[in-house]
Image (spheres, helix red, strand yellow):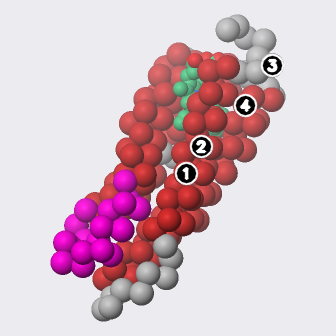
Amino acid sequence: MSKVLLILHVLAAVIAIGPVTVAASMFPAAARRAYADPGSGLSVPRLLNRICRVYAIFGLAVPFFGLATAGSMRVFGDVWVLVSIVLTAAAAGVLALLVLPGQNAILADLGAQPPSEPLTAGRVAMYTGVFNLLWAVVTVLMIVRPGSTTGA
Ligand code: HEM
């Protein structure tokens, strides 16, 4: 059972978090291009934003199956699991409260005439960097599992 849950957990991480990472990382440059050349249209930043929003929802499967795997393996009390839960919640918070609203604000601004660039693409790039770093640290924790007594 643990193996099935672990497979679903890792599949969800690869399929959902991967696209969010790529699309969110590409968004600031696409926004800058749209500001620099207003005639180029908004289809690319809009598509990247949509990928982030849709795959962020799929991404909820990662902690869901992660918690189920931890329960099934009886490792819930382990420090690495508790730290992963906190860091995953922090990553989700950064995505939901900073990255996505920042992208939405930029898209709304780009749609206005004339755009005023209230929130710089650089700031959204910084939020995205924090998000990427947080889940990269969680991935390292998942593999290194400091303090784990259940094997390498
Ligand atoms: C609520 C947060 C999370 C919990 C409770 C959790 C729990 C777990 C558990 C119990 C395992 C099995 C470890 C083992 O085989 O001994 C695991 C493996 C794994 N998790 Fe998570 N996880 C969480 C979040 C994440 C996130 C955010 C990612 C990456 C985006 C991730 C990626 C992985 C990977 C790649 C493995 C396979 C590691 C291996 O078996 O070597 N997990 N996770």
Provide the residue designation for mark 4.
81
Q: In the image, is 139 to the left or to the right of 144?
A: left
Nearer mark to the viewer, of 2 and 3 = 2
The residue that label 1 is drawn on is 129
Write down the residue under mark 2. 133
Q: Which residues are magenta?
A: 26-44
User: On screen, 102 above or below 89?
Assistant: below
**Mark 3–mark 4 contact, CB under 8 Å?**
no
Assign the magenta stretch its main secondary structure. Answer: helix
Residue type highlighted by circle 4: Val
Q: Amino acid at mark 1?
A: Gly
Q: Secondary structure at mark 3?
A: loop
Q: How many tags in the picture? A: 4
Measure how far apart labels 3 and 4 are at the Cα level.
10 Å
* Label 4 CA crowd tier, 10 Å (few <14, some 14–19, many 20+): many
Ligand 1 positioned in quadrant = top right
